[in-house]
């Protein structure tokens, strides 16, 4: 495991704080990681994990802390806990957001992280980035009314409002590059295999 | 709007608490909604929404409260706030989970809600339902190392452990039916259009 300073940690250069743009993204570390992982594809294999428990009705609680990557078990600093439920218009308790709304959180978070990272790499100073995300859904799908209506989103839109030291075209290019490298955008726009098992 | 008791609310039967199974899902209301929405496709059009703000680095905060459905604006009882960041192995602050992990929360929540609803409809008493969800990812995709490696999950697995008053085959059938009607499972396994704009 010569590509690792010690097992499970990449040997990455400290960020250069004198760079023109200070968006808080350690781009040099990411560029270093790219070089290291080019020669170590096995270290690039990550597994993200969640464990979920049914509460009552359609309410569930999901916990996230551990994941696997860089050849070993890793963990977030703290455990995060998320509840999901259905709203009152679906005759439920509305004790939390609906599961499908979590996809909007992931989509916004992933594209925005990408905008910040690409801006840092291009030395563009961001001042503010906000996004409105919408997912359209015809609930006749999940209710089983019409088999021609899909269960999920019929479409999704993300609208960015960005204030930065850059031209409108440069700002659009930031967002386009973020889309090109976004993990969540990829999962939503392309098919992903999901294997469901009962043990 | 004769299908609505008053605008924005479905006229639904009160749940029968004497049913054999008490999983807390108001299945009668959902069956009633199905009948009502059969004749009112415009009321079945929902829009889920989130608004997201960049904080610093790859850290963003997303808020959810309002949505549209049953022909009018709706809202959750409370506003929910979610942070996303990257872990320290990506040279970030790890102040929250990674955006792609939110997809696992949504997938678990949606399938588990379905298991509870289908169990209620089939009068199967659930005692406990837990799920482990995993998403595999080769980070050479998002790092731009190899254009043949996708950015998102290479695969996802959901493993259920269910204790219920039912045979193993009946339990497997609950999970299979939940998959068939799951909005999040549909979005992850099938392509969904995402339009990204800058205003």
Image (cartoon, coloured by chain):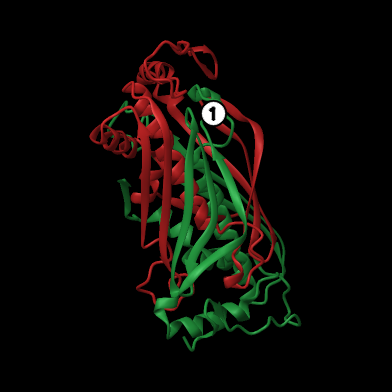
Chain colours: A red, B green
Asked if one can make out residue B157 in the rendered structure from this viewpoint, the answer is yes
In the displayed structure, would residue B156 be above or below residue B174? above
Residue B171 falls left or right of residue A133 = right
Residue A18 falls left or right of residue A70 = left
In the displayed structure, would residue B96 be above or below residue B79? above
At x 39%, y 13%, the residue is A19
At x 32%, y 47%, the residue is B196
At x 38%, y 20%, the residue is A21
In the displayed structure, would residue B13 be above or below residue A199? below
Expressed as whole percent of the image width and height from the top left, the position of residue A67 reads 57, 33
**Residue underneath mark 1:** B87
Chain of the residue under label 1: B
Seen as rendered, the residue at the extreme right is: B18
Secondary structure beneath label 1: loop
Seen as rendered, the residue at the extreme left is: A169
Relative depth, front residue between A146 and A174: A174
Query: Is the residue marked by circle 1 packed among few (<14), some (14-19), or many (20+) residues within 10 Å?
Result: some
At x 34%, y 24%, the residue is A124
Expressed as whole percent of the image width and height from the top left, the position of residue B139 reads 41, 30
Residue A139 falls left or right of residue B76 = left
Q: How many marks?
A: 1
Asked if one can make out residue B153 in the rendered structure from this viewpoint, the answer is no
Expressed as whole percent of the image width and height from the top left, the position of residue B17 reads 75, 80
């Amino acid at each position: 495991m010569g590509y690792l300073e010690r097992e499970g940690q990449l040997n990455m250069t400290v960020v250069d704080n004198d760079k023109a743009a200070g968006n808080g993204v350690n781009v040099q570390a990411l560029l270093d990681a790219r070089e290291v992982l080019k020669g170590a594809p096995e270290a690039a294999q990550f597994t993200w994990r969640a464990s979920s428990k049914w509460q009552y009705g359609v309410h569930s609680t999901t916990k996230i802390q551990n994941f696997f990557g860089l050849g070993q078990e890793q963990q977030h600093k703290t455990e995060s806990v998320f509840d999901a439920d259905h709203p009152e218009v679906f005759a439920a308790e509305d004790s939390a957001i609906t599961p499908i709304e979590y996809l909007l959180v992931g989509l916004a978070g992933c594209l925005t992280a990408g905008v910040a990272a690409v801006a840092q790499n291009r030395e563009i100073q961001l001042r503010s980035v906000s996004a409105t995300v919408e997912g359209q859904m015809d609930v006749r799908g999940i209710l089983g009314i019409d088999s021609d209506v899909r269960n999920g989103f019929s479409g999704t839109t993300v609208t960015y409002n960005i204030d930065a030291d850059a031209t409108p075209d440069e700002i659009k290019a930031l967002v386009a590059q973020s889309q090109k490298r976004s993990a969540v955008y990829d999962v939503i726009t392309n098919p992903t295999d999901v294997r469901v098992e009962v043990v």
